[in-house]
Image: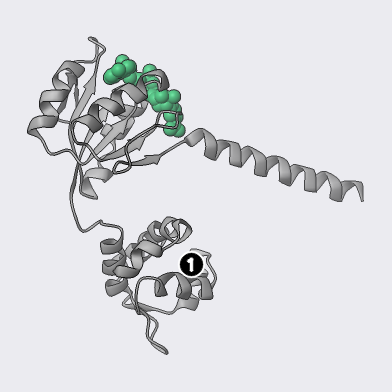
Amino acid sequence: MEKKRSISMAVIKRLPKYYRYLRELDKNDVDRISSKELSEKIGFTASQIRQDLNCFGDFGQQGYGYNVKDLLYQISVILGLNKAYNTVIIGAGNIGQAIANYTTFDKMSFNLKGIFDLNVKLIGLKIRDIEIKDMDELEGFLQEEEIDIAIICVPKSRAQGVVDMVTNKGVKAIWNFAPIDLKVADDVIVENVHLSESLMTLSYLINERNEARELTEEE
Ligand code: NAI
C-alpha cells in the first residue's frame, strides 16, 4: 500500500473501469483472466493493464493471469470501496433529487443520511425515505452525524458559502456539482463532476470527426 501515494491520477482514474469489468466477470463466475483477455474487454492495452496493476502490487501470475475475485477485492480496497461513507446532499433541485433517487450509491455503501435545501416548497418533502430538511438544521445535523461527504447541488453563487460552512463543521470531502472551482483547506478533498465539460469534449470530437469526413470527401 505504501506505493499508493506515488500513483499517478491517470492510473487512479482507470481503476473504476477495472473494478466495473471485474465485477461483471465475477458475477458471471469467471475465475481468472489474462491481461490479454482483459485488454480485449476493457480497451486498454495488455501492457497498460500489467503496468497499472503492478503499481499496486504483484497481482498477476505468469501463465495464469489474474484471479478475478482477488483482483476485484484488491481494487475495491485500493479505491476504499470496502468501507462505508455517510453522505449529505445540499440543494434538492434537479441534480440533488436525481442523486438522492439513485439507490446504487447506497448499494456501494455511500449512505445518504440527509438532504438539505432552503426552499420552503421543498422542505418536508421526502425523497425515498429521507425528508428534505431546512438549511437552518444543517449545522446541528453535522454535529450529531458523522458525515464523510457533502454533495453540493446548489447554484454556483451559493456553492462556496455552503462548502465553507460544511467544512468548518468537519466535513472533509466534497462531491461538487456546481460549476465553480471551490477554495478549501489542504485537508479537504474536492472531486468535481462537470457534465458540461464532458459534453464539450463530445462536441469537440463530433466536429473533429466531421472535419475529417469533409477532408476525405474533398480528396
Ligand atoms: P436547481 O435550481 O434545480 O436546484 C438548486 C437547489 O439549490 C434549489 O432547490 C435551491 O432551493 C437550492 N439552494 C439554493 N441556494 C441554497 C443554499 N444556500 N443552501 C441550500 N440549498 C440552496 O438547480 P440544478 O439544476 O439542480 O443545479 C444545481 C447545481 O448543479 C447548479 O450549480 C448547476 O449549475 C449545477 N449543474 C451541474 C451539472 C454538472 O454537470 N455538474 C449539470 C447541471 C447543473
Crowding at dot 1, Cα within 10 Å, few <14 / some 14-19 / many 20+, comes out as few
Q: In the displayed structure, does residue 12 sit left or right of residue 136?
A: right
Count of marks, rendered view? 1
Residue 95: image location, x then y, percent: 36, 28
Residue 179: image location, x then y, percent: 46, 29
Dividing the picture into quadrants, the one containing residue 70 is bottom left
**Res 25 visible:** no
For image coordinates 26% across by 32% down, the residue present is 100
Given the current orientation, which residue lies at the most extreme bottom position? 63
Q: Amino acid at mark 1?
A: Lys
**Res 46 visible:** yes
For image coordinates 26% across by 57% down, the residue present is 80
Q: Is residue 204 above or below residue 119?
A: below
For image coordinates 52% across by 66% down, the residue present is 44
Residue 118: image location, x then y, percent: 25, 14
Given the current orientation, which residue lies at the most extreme left position? 144
For image coordinates 32% across by 22% down, the residue present is 161
Given the current orientation, which residue lies at the most extreme right position? 219
- The kind of secondary structure element at disc 1 is helix
Which one is nearer the viewer's eye here, 25 or 203? 203
Quadrant containing the N terminus in the rendered view: bottom left
Q: In the displayed structure, does residue 89 sit left or right of residue 41?
A: left
Q: In the displayed structure, does residue 160 sit left or right of residue 179?
A: left
Q: In the displayed structure, does residue 29 sit left or right of residue 156?
A: left
Which one is nearer the viewer's eye here, 101 or 198? 198
Residue 144: image location, x then y, percent: 7, 32
Q: Which residue is mark 1?
A: 41
